[in-house]
Amino acid sequence: MNGWASFILRNHMEVDMMTRCNYCDNILNYHVSKSPCDEVLFESTSHIVTTTLGAFVEGWTLVISKRHVTSMSQLSVSEIQELSSLVSDVRKRVEQVYGSTVVFEHGSLDPGTNFGCGIDHAHIHIVPFEDSIIPVINNEPLDIHWRPLESLEDIATENKPYLFVIDREERNGVISNPENIPSQFMRRVLAKYLSIPEYFDYHQYSYEEKASATCRSLRYAFDYAPIQG
């Protein structure tokens, strides 16, 4: 291979690595064996439900779009309607096992941003949490601007980066100035509340044992148990 061809191949590989999506290549690729942090618990028409890397809380699950978009606000109306129904269903199943939950999404509209936390594929977190998360967020020393939403379906109106939150009291809100928010913000908030602030970073702490425990505990809830309430 001559020097020019080698240069083109090397640059193609570098661009490819920069644009590859871990969710598309691994979690959504049914021919790839899954780690305990990527176990698929449930599948709908447009989304899957999985365990997750860096879950320092047992019961932490993700709802991931099958279509490659960077935020749920970029989905079609029908996909968002399905998402809203699925998130409600998944919360009930998780709460049967682990108690009350909070829901959030770092809605990054562009790939490669700090706000996107390194995952440029739309996903929503459902996390067991005993308290109200919005007051906990408000205690952070940041200039945060909240805007209420009627429901998850209203994220379709978002045309800039956002942080979407559903509190345990079913309060919905969007932080509309995410430029003031550090990477992995909600992980930082939750870890700090649980007195383990140094363990927020999923790049450093995989918590595979908690993902495995989550999978064992929720497998019955998703495969067999009826929804209550």
Image: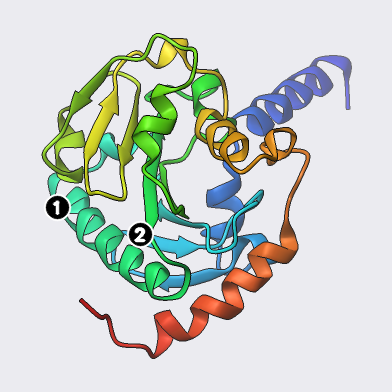
**Which residue type carries mark 2?**
His
Q: Relative to residue 200, is residue 105 drawn left or right?
A: left
The reply to whether residue 35 is in sight is: no
Q: Which quadrant would residue 14 be assigned to in this image? A: top right
Q: Relative to residue 42, is residue 158 drawn left or right?
A: left
What's the CA distance linking mark 1 and mark 2? Answer: 12 Å
Disc 1 target residue: 78
Disc 2 target residue: 47
Residue at the image point whose x is 22% and y is 39% from the top: 172
Q: Relative to residue 201, is residue 41 drawn left or right?
A: left
Residue at the image point whose x is 79% and y is 22% from the top: 5
**Which residue type carries mark 1?**
Ser
The reply to whether residue 207 is in sight is: yes
Q: Relative to residue 224, is residue 36 drawn left or right?
A: right
Mark 1 or 2 closer to N-term? Answer: 2
Q: Which secondary structure lies at badge 1?
A: helix
Per the rendering, the mark at residue 126 is: none
Where is residue 202 drawn, in percent x and y? 68, 41
In the rendered image of this protein, does residue 212 appear above or below residue 145?
Answer: below
Q: Where's the N terminus, which quadrant? A: top right
Q: Which quadrant would residue 147 be assigned to in this image? A: top left
Q: Which secondary structure lies at badge 2?
A: strand
